[in-house]
Image (cartoon, rainbow, N blue to C red):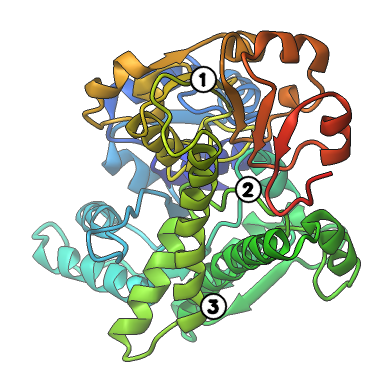
Amino acid sequence: MKITIVGAGYVGLVSAACFAELGNQVLCVERDTARVERLKNAEVPIFEPGLSELIAKNLAAGRLVFTTEMKAGVRHADALFIAVGTPPKGDSSADTSQVLAVAEQIGAHLSRFLVVVDKSTVPVGTADKVRETIARALKKRTDLAKKAPDFAVVSNPEFLKEGAAVEDFMRPDRVVIGVSDDAAGRKAETLLRQAYAPFNRNRERLIVMDVKSAELTKYAANALLATKISFMNDMANLADALGADIEQVRKGIGSDRRIGYDFIYAGLGYGGSCFPKDVAAICHTAREAGERMRVVEAVRAVNEGQKERFVDRVIAHFGGSLKGRTIAVWGLTFKPATDDVREAPSRHIVRKLIAAGAKVQAHDPQVQSLAQLMPGENVARLQADIAFVTNPMEAAKGADALLIATEWKVYRSPDFAALKKLLKKPVIFDGRNLFEPADMKRLGFQYQGVGRRTA
């Protein structure tokens, strides 16, 4: 099958590489010329396990091609997937301008039946706007002597976890497809069933529904997962107050199959490119519809408060000021196995530590500069107060305390004897509950986790 992916970001690159791996002819269109040139040389601008190898392999095989030419992308495709960004606007709504700009170009170049697939996370009703935009662009064309070519607009939301995206794409829990109940929609369903047929060998994974329900499904999934995280952080704070241990609570409730163990780890809250944006967007969508997502609004508030609460504990430990103190920070990305720092708790934590007077010595396997940690921001004033080091132990050297913000595997089994000698004071604030409080006490550390009973 001939597939076009528009957008060489996280979702676009994973989708393009994986569809190519399945034997499709994939053309990936990206407007950033420099990015395209890098990708043509198999230089992948994001870190995602397995992705670089997949792109290099399929470039060499000729199944994957990168271009800046939108016309070529439209003319190439049986199915064109829109995978551009939908960043939040100031009012928390999703900015769909890039999606609609692609739709405009599709209408300008469409020459035969095409299935247009919204892969980007978009508000309910976006498919209708995409359809209207394409139709308007077709009407403007003077080169169409006969009837304009037909097309279908489909919703096919992605459910990829950063750090496991290739595996998620190749072995999905489900593939949601939203199609219209008309001839074009039925034709689109047939084509997408063909595209996703390799994923259905063991069992049927396709869930077909109407377009608006598919659009809402993505927001509902992310809002529910974010709710689980914030619920557990609320429980962790209560555990602190009552002298209970949230890890024991987690084991007790996670064994219930109706709940499960996924997304019930207490910590610093959720971050990344999806949960914060999508939770905010669904609240905005509800307000526009005259409704309120009261539970989800509370989820947002808990998530924001969790970062504040944790840093406040660090500051309180040192008597209300960090002036003259050095804090080591392990982990800067919002989760391990990615280089994504969007909405990462570490960004707020670093700012607040410095504002309280601290110097920060930071380590992360993928983030090694202030420009990486806070891209596009004017943070020159922070430069003098934060140092990036190449290994975790170097970050701890001479520090008054260690703060763990991301649960990278490299941090799970340190040489505690060496760590204790390197730290000026044997103090650990574990924002990801990597260690057992009793073990830390036995080793001579002052240890604070999230909702963990002090041994």
317 displayed left or right of 258: left
The answer to the question of whether label 2 and label 3 lie on touching residues, with beta carbons closer than 8 A, is no
Indicate which disc residue 74 carries. none
User: Label 3 sits on what residue type?
Assistant: Arg
Q: CA distance from mark 2 to mark 3?
A: 30 Å
Residue sitting nearer the eye, 262 or 294: 294
Dot 1 alpha-carbon crowd within 10 angstroms: few under 14, some 14 to 19, many 20 or more: many
Q: Regarding mark 2 in the picture, which secondary structure is present there?
A: loop
Please indicate, yes or no, whether residue 116 appears anywhere in the rendered image.
Answer: no
Q: Regarding mark 3 in the picture, which secondary structure is present there?
A: helix
Residue displayed at 42% across by 73% down: 282
Quarter of the figure that contains the C terminus: top right
User: Label 1 sits on what residue type?
Assistant: Ala
Residue displayed at 38% across by 42% down: 7
Mark before the other along the chain sequence, 2 or 3: 2
Residue sitting nearer the eye, 425 or 419: 425
Indicate which disc residue 186 carries. 3
Residue 421 image position (x, y, % from top left): 72, 9
Per the image, the residue denoted by label 2 is 161
Residue sitting nearer the eye, 45 or 386: 386
Dot 2 alpha-carbon crowd within 10 angstroms: few under 14, some 14 to 19, many 20 or more: few
Per the image, the residue denoted by label 1 is 362
Residue 440 image position (x, y, % from top left): 82, 31
Q: CA distance from mark 2 to mark 1?
A: 25 Å
